[in-house]
Amino acid sequence: MAAGEVRPWPVFMLAFVGCLLCIVNVIILTGVDVKGKISKIVLPKEVKKAFPYFDPPNLVDDIDLPDELDQHPIVALTRDQLKKFDRYKRAQPKSFAQVVEKYRLKYGRHPPPNFDEWYKFAKKRKCVNFDDFDQIMDDLRPYWGMKPADIRAMVKAMDTDQSRVSILKVRGQKVAQTSRPDAWRASVFERMLAVAAPLLPDLDIAMNYLDEPRVVAPWEEVQAKLAQEKKTRVQHPETVNEFSKIDWDAPIDIKNLDLGFFDHSGKPYMDLASKACPPESYARRPELDIKHVESKYKDPVGGFIRNFNLSSDLCTIGPHLANLHGFLFSSSTTIATQKLVPIFGECKVNVNNDILFPANKYYDLADPRYIYNDEQDVAWHEKTPKMVWRGVTSGGVQNQEIYHRLQRHRFVALTNSSKLSGTEVTIMEAVSEDNTSGEYTPTFFHPAHYADSTMDVGFSAIVWCVPDCHFLDDKLSAKPSLEFKETFKFKYLADIDGHSFSGRWYAFLKSRSMGIKSTIFREWHDQRLFEWVHFAPMDNRFDDLYALMTYFTGVEKGVGGKDGAYVPRHDTEAKRIADRSREWAMQVLRTEDIEIYMLRLLLEYARVVDDNRDKIGYSGDGSEVDSADNNRLGWRYRL
Ligand SMILES: *[C@@H]1O[C@H](CO)[C@@H](O)[C@H](O)[C@H]1NC(C)=O
Ligand SMILES: *[C@@H]1O[C@H](CO)[C@@H](O)[C@H](O)[C@H]1NC(C)=O
Ligand SMILES: *[C@@H]1O[C@H](CO)[C@@H](O)[C@H](O)[C@H]1NC(C)=O
């Protein structure tokens, strides 16, 4: 045969075998998964209307929605949230002019002084969401209802041991001496502050060094302050783009200033929280039936969370969580105040008025217990298809009477197969076994066997009991602890509150595994994370745990169900959540994003404590920054 001539038969053979291998591979990898489907989404009208300049990009990057033919409630929830997330991304401003215009539309004021510098700072750090800072405005708005000098006096008055805060200072655009610098959170805060300091005026900041949040002002008082804030919104024509000179070290009379701190450790938190809720809310009408409350935030069929925000809203669900979360009935250190006192804190519950800042654990890149290391992670298909959780017995004071109501103890008990022999839970099973993309119906399920084969959950240490932990000897045993890197060998990573929020969350989001989150705490980043898109939300009562897990892992016929429940596997959906959270976290939960948030927060804080706050700010239209930007870009392209 001459060179170059093709012998068709062997080539076809090879191609055929190749295809076959390919198909077999795909089947092995994806199992009996429900297939995804691509469909189009159109830009919502309200975004265009609210921001007429908004120029939607071509719809080339269509979002990948799970198949609607699959009627599992989680599919519909995922589709809704994916559309929301897509809208969020499309509504982000694309230039400084748009950032400024949107700012004024939303908040009714000029942006604070040095806002143009903040934009350049953020742009340099490759910010992708220039309009996601509502949390800062929500936290600081009540202080627009007070005189700047009064706010500063409160900060001064907090400089005592009883207040349990560190006072951090900026002087001459540098970080100055911190009071109580030994508090471990202060040193990391100092490092974050140092990055922002060159753009800040002199400033004192009171930072909570306890784990638990501090400020829980009554609803009526906060509303009065918010109404005041609204009345004072102005956009003066003669606004100047610089802060005033304030002498924070000048002596002022704070003798009669009562900040109202009191010790509420171990006492029912809802006593304080309900006063911070609207009069018509469930928190003030605890007689309301749980079903009624659930309908506000859960899907009616499977009990899955439809609104993660509301699932931790104490004004809604508070009375039903009051005895189920350590912070709400047995917190170890709650030094609270019902006065509006400007304290910066890492986390809070929805009724608190603490001013949120990004947690130190997320910025302190030296602590291997919390930091994600890509080299220690493995690909999805190499991971064990189980849920993993390890932690210590924290989350509230543990004694014989109440320990079993603490969230971590409840979670560990609920996944301990030897405790589950008589237990029945409700899950969603497929109506017919051969129709994987069809209907589902609620059914009872005996989870003992499933828990044993699918959940690797337990305490790594049993500590901090009162008077000691012997009363737990016959009820609990510690499981072998896992190094942090070992957790990434599992597909499903559960995250449960301890004394306060969980510091592992960023590592979970950045990993190739899927996070499952339940919490009552709020953090700075909440608005940029979407339930069902970036993680699977779980009710703080864990009543949805098995329905949730069986959706992802699937259940083979004959396991646990009365007549053998069958649930098709949604492994691909789980992987998609893991992939999306990883990709997104690498864009919006970086060290850079923390610095961007901190600088903007501190600019806003510095303005609200400035005596001239109505006449300082950035009053331009943003064009000078954009055209400088465009020129620079032009140069780059020409080179
Ligand atoms: C599954 O069943 C539903 C309802 O009976 C039907 O509409 C759907 O077409 C079926 N799907 C498949 C893949 O057979
Ligand atoms: C599970 O429950 C049994 C029975 O209460 C108990 O003996 C065991 O220590 C528990 N296991 C773990 C890991 O806590
Ligand atoms: C949660 O809901 C409240 C009240 O509607 C809202 O102000 C807040 O921005 C929401 N938070 C998030 C993270 O969506």
Image (cartoon, rainbow, N blue to C red):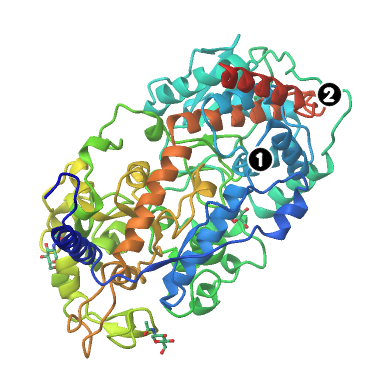
Q: Is residue 626 left or right of residue 75?
A: right
- In the image, farthest residue toward the top: 172
In the image, what residue occupies the spot 70% across and 54% down? 47
Task: Give SS at disc 2.
Answer: loop
In-front residue for pair 478/131: 131
- The residue under label 2 is 239
Q: Earlier in the sequence, mark 2 or mark 1?
A: 1
> How busy is the neighbourhood of tag 2: few (under 14 within 10 Å), some, or many (20 plus)?
some
Which amino acid type corresponds to the residue marked 2 in the rendered image? Thr
In-front residue for pair 216/84: 84
Task: Give SS at disc 1.
Answer: loop
Q: Is residue 574 placed above or below 239 in the rendered structure?
A: below
In the image, what residue occupies the spot 84% across and 33% down? 235
Q: Is residue 350 left or right of residue 396?
A: right
Q: Is residue 332 placed above or below 99 in the rendered structure?
A: below
- The residue under label 1 is 93
| x then y, percent, for residue 445 | 26, 81
In the image, what residue occupies the spot 59% across and 11% down? 171
Which amino acid type corresponds to the residue marked 1 in the rendered image? Pro
Which disc, if any, is residue 136? none
Q: Quadrant of the C terminus?
A: top right
